[in-house]
């Protein structure tokens, strides 16, 4: 299976899972509030779709897709922490977003041999 197909299937799967979480949240008589889980899946879906649209690893779609995908993974980790009973401060959200943005932009400079292999 081609790598672009895998990226598209990841985007589709994350989006469908987010729709199922929305249905689960609002269709019950006793709605369940699981914070960040829907946002996490939507960010992962958008990030995977942006990576699907990217033509290379240093493309702006790839950089934005990496940021969205990493933020989605962070939100999903926060969801697991909240479900297990731990609190997440609001400052963690802002600091994580600010820290991931330059990382995703600079990854293409840190690993040039991987960037050349993926773009060919």
Image (tube, helix red, strand yellow):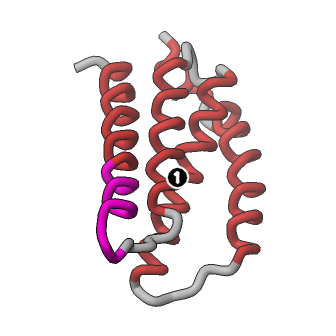
Q: Nearer the viewer, residue 37 or 53?
A: 37
For residue 98: magenta?
no
Is 106 on the left or on the right of 112, as rendered? right
Q: Nearer the viewer, residue 27 or 81?
A: 27
Residue for badge 1: 72
Image spot of residue 42 (x, y percent): 49, 45
Image spot of residue 66 (x, y percent): 58, 39
Magenta highlight range: 20-30
Res 102 → quadrant: top right
- Residue at x-position 35% and y-position 33%: 12
Is 39 on the left or on the right of 1, as rendered? right
Image spot of residue 24 (x, y percent): 31, 60
- Residue at x-position 58% and y-position 34%: 65
- Residue at x-position 76% and y-position 65%: 95
Vertical order, 24 against 112 (above or below): below
Vertical order, 19 against 53 (above or below): below
For residue 22: magenta?
yes
Q: Nearer the viewer, residue 112 or 83?
A: 83
The residue most toward the left is 1
Vertical order, 28 against 11 (above or below): below
- Residue at x-position 46% and y-position 79%: 81
Vertical order, 14 against 118 (above or below): below
């Amino acid at each position: 299976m081609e790598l672009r197909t895998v990226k598209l299937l990841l985007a589709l799967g994350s989006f469908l899972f987010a729709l199922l979480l929305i249905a689960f949240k609002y269709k019950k008589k006793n709605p369940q509030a699981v914070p960040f889980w829907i946002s996490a899946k939507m960010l992962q879906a958008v990030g995977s779709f942006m990576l699907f649209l990217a033509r290379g690893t240093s493309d702006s779609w790839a950089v934005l897709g990496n940021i969205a995908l990493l933020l989605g993974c962070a939100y999903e980790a926060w969801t697991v922490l909240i479900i297990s009973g731990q609190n997440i401060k609001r400052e963690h959200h802002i600091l994580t977003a600010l820290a991931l943005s330059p990382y995703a932009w600079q990854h293409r400079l840190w690993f040039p041999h991987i960037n050349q292999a993926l773009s060919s």
